[in-house]
Every structure is written in structure tokens, then in C-alpha cells.
Image: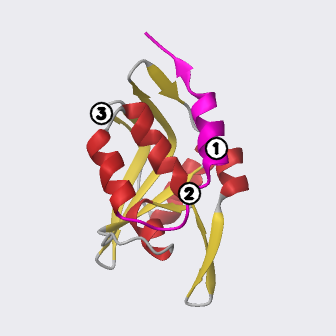
């Protein structure tokens, strides 16, 4: 699924994408990395962890991530690929379908991380109307950690 600012731009938000953020289910991460010709590695920082690979193809940076876990403010949010797939939207670009990460996922991750600057930036960028039911389900899945 396409995520990040590229996905938000395709849904009408105002960001100027710098790269393509691609999120895949953890079980598909190795295959996706091989298709891109890059290697996965563990990535962690500022409360976020995942497996990740970055590759530049034809001048465009592709950021592949899987298994994104966000920890902050005493909460941990694990990935839910099934829910993301259920709530994803598909847009057509150049005649091809592109599946988008639910835009609410970025908001939920920012809330759990306690990243108020990121949350403000996401809200200010606009985009499609948010679906509270998705956010409630994701926030309900967050678990307390010490």
C-alpha cells in the first residue's frame, strides 16, 4: 500500500511528496525488498520501529516499511494489516490501481507517539474526510506499556 505524503496527495491533501512510502505486511517484506533490489534492516527511533529498506529508482526515493510499531505516552500500537486493507482506498493513477494506506493511520500513529507537531501538520494538510470509526478501532487496539 502507498502511504505517507504521496498517498495523502492522491487523496487531495496539500503536501508535496518527496518520496514514495510503501507499506507491506511483514510476511511480504522480503519479497517486496527483493523486487526493489534492496535489503531490509531493522529501523528504530523516536518510538517507531519497523523493518525498512530505502532505494532510489529513476530519481525517486522508495521507502519500504513493514511491521510498523509505534510506542509513546505509555501506549504501544502494533500493526494491523487486515484492518488497514479493509479500510484502504484505491485510486487510479495512469490507468493503474494504487491501494492507499488509510489516511487515518498516520493520525493514530502520531497520537500514540505523542508527536503533536506531526499531528498538527497532518491535520493542516487536509485531504479526505476522516473516518472516526477507523481511528476508534486503532486506538482501542493500542495497549498500555511501562
**Residue that appears at 33% across and 69% down:** 15
Q: How is the image coloured?
A: secondary structure
- For this view, does 10 lie left or right of residue 141? left
> Disc 1 on helix, strand or loop?
helix
Q: Quadrant of the N terminus?
A: bottom right
Residue sitting nearer the eye, 136 or 71: 136
Quarter of the image holding residue 131?
bottom right
Q: Residues within 10 Å of mark 1 (few under 14, many from 20)?
A: few
Residue sitting nearer the eye, 73 or 61: 73
Q: Residues within 10 Å of mark 3 (few under 14, many from 20)?
A: few
Q: Which residue is mark 2?
A: 130
Residue 135 x/y as whole percent: 59, 43
Mark nearest the camera among 3 and 1 is 3
Of labels 3 and 1, earlier in sequence is 1
Q: Which residue is mark 3?
A: 45
Of labels 3 and 2, earlier in sequence is 3
Of labels 2 and 1, earlier in sequence is 1
Q: Which residue is mark 1?
A: 27
Which residues, given as a range, are shown in magenta?
Answer: 125-146
Residue 25 x/y as whole percent: 61, 47
- For this view, does 74 lie left or right of residue 133? left
Amino acid at each position: 500500500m502507498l502511504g505517507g505524503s504521496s498517498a495523502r496527495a492522491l487523496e487531495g491533501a496539500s503536501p508535496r511528496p518527496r518520496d514514495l512510502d510503501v507499506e507491506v505486511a511483514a510476511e511480504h517484506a522480503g519479497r517486496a525488498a527483493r523486487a526493489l533490489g534492496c535489503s531490509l534492516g531493522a529501523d528504530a527511533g523516536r518510538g517507531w520501529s519497523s523493518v525498512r529498506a530505502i532505494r532510489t529508482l529513476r530519481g525517486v526515493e522508495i521507502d519500504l516499511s513493514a511491521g510498523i510499531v509505534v510506542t509513546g505516552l505509555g501506549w504501544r500500537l502494533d500493526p494491523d494489516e487486515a484492518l488497514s486493507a479493509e479500510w484502504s482506498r484505491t485510486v487510479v493513477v495512469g490507468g493503474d490501481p494504487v491501494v492507499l494506506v488509510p489516511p487515518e493511520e498516520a493520525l493514530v500513529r502520531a497520537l500514540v507517539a505523542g508527536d503533536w507537531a506531526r499531528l498538527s501538520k497532518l491535520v493542516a494538510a487536509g485531504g479526505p474526510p476522516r473516518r472516526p470509526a477507523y481511528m476508534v478501532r486503532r486506538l482501542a487496539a493500542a495497549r498500555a506499556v511501562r
